[in-house]
Image: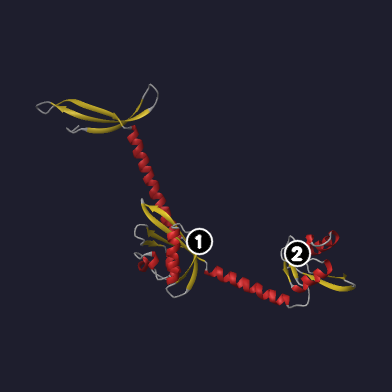
Amino acid sequence: MAGKPMVNEEQINFASDGHIAVIETIKTPIFSADGAVTGVLGIAREITERKKAEIELRTAKEKAEENEEKFRTLFEISPIANAIIEKETGLIKEVNPAFESSTGFKRKEIIGQKAGDLKIWSAPERYRLVREWKLNTNLKNLEVKYSTKWNEDRTGLLSVTPAFISGKGYYFAMNLDITERIKAELAVRESEANLNAVVNNRNESIWSIDKDFNFLILNNFFIDSFEKVFQIKLKKGINVKDVLPGDQFMFWKQKYEKSLKGNRITFEFEIPVGKSVVHMRFILTQL
């Protein structure tokens, strides 16, 4: 025992009820006047709950470290611009590579700045963000306008949520760049407007339906012609079966179904319009 107390932990299985306890024992040698070991003083105490608490604490710490590592990995590889802002000071503590590429600013130019002082905001937009922030510090998909380092105007969806990292309060900010999506939506609207202009300048009936026989495109000539024959004013979204008598709907349904399978359908027939009879030629084709 080398003259020093020995501390050990032992598991004891109690025969009375079968439960297992952890016991800490301290064994201290007893010496005579001439230095010889004459005995041992033993002290034992149960530390089961303490050991359990230590294990739980160690497990929780390992889990927290694992979660922080996962968070760090996701933060770094995310294609969305991310920033971590210190709650107490409002200073930016970290940004990911996507933040750098989307704004043009390097990490060293951003870290330590206040989020509101970044050079990406115009004065009106900065004031608006401050106002929104005061109303709600948990922002979700707030549309924002910002400029890159190259003075390129961009649009994003900004989300900010409180977060705790290593027990300290932060804000986690994400900005999804939707500039190209907005451009695409605008292009589609312009394309639809151009298509409508072309379609409505034709003195012939032009229309389209979807696979469920709902009208999608109707030019004015077709709307007027249909109203003269059936006394019904068509509009987008109306279903063919709701405006044609049963026998006529079945006739057109067969034609539409063939066309929707990729066949070009051409046919002719006469339609009574008032006291006149109009000879019509139809061409159906899949878009």
Q: Which mark is residue 260?
A: 2
Report x, y in % for residue 169. 37, 54
Q: Secondary structure at mark 1?
A: loop
Q: Which mark is residue 7?
A: none
The quadrant in which the N terminus is found is top left
Q: Which residue is mark 1?
A: 141
Separation of marks 2 and 1 at Cα, in angstroms: 39 Å
Q: Is residue 126 above or below residue 43?
A: below
Identify the image quadrant of residue 207.
Answer: bottom right
Q: Amino acid at mark 2?
A: Leu
Which residue lies at the image location 38% right of the left edge and 56% below the top edge?
Answer: 170
Q: Nearer the viewer, residue 271 or 285?
A: 271
Q: Nearer the viewer, residue 144 or 270?
A: 144
Q: Is residue 86 above or below residue 46?
A: below
Crowding near pointer 2: few (<14 within 10 Å), some, many (20+)? Answer: some
Residue 4 as seen in the image, left or right of residue 258 = left
Camera sees residue 76: no
